[in-house]
Amino acid sequence: MDNDLRLKLMTGVDIPIPELQITIHPPSVKEIAYMGEQDFFMAI
């Protein structure tokens, strides 16, 4: 995996995928903590 993508995934920065015309938003640690770890893992 390319280092720039890994950094984006770790920081929760939106990642555009122009070929699919979508933008994904990986959750940051703060967002996971807000949701609750158990609920997060149930969702994924």
Image: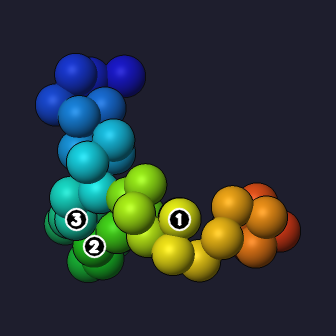
Find out whether the residues at labels 3 and 2 contact each other: C-beta distance under 8 Å.
yes
Percent across and percent down for residue 30 are 39, 63
- Which amino acid type corresponds to the residue marked 1 in the rendered image? Ile
Residue 32: which numbered mark, if any? Answer: 1
Q: Is residue 18 left or right of residue 44?
A: left
Q: CA distance from mark 1 to mark 2?
A: 19 Å
* Foreground disc of the pair 1, 2: 1
The percent coordinates of residue 15 (x first, y second) are 23, 59
Q: Secondary structure at mark 1?
A: helix
Q: Does 39 sit left or right of 36 as displayed?
A: right
Disc 2 target residue: 23
Apparent side of residue 9 relative to residue 3 in the rendered image (left or right):
right
Q: Position of residue 18 (x, y in %)?
A: 19, 66
Q: Earlier in the sequence, mark 3 or mark 1?
A: 3
Callout in the foreground (3, 1): 1
Provide the residue designation for mark 3: 14
The residue drawn where x is 26% and y is 48% is 11
Label annotation for residue 10? none
> Which residue is pictured at 53% across the width and 65% down the height?
33
Mark 3 surroundings within 10 Å by alpha-carbon count, few (fewer than 14), some (14 through 19), many (20 or more): few
**Of pointers 3 and 2, the one earlier in the residue sequence:** 3
Q: Position of residue 41 (x, y in %)?
A: 76, 60
- Residue shown at 30%/76% (left/top)? 22
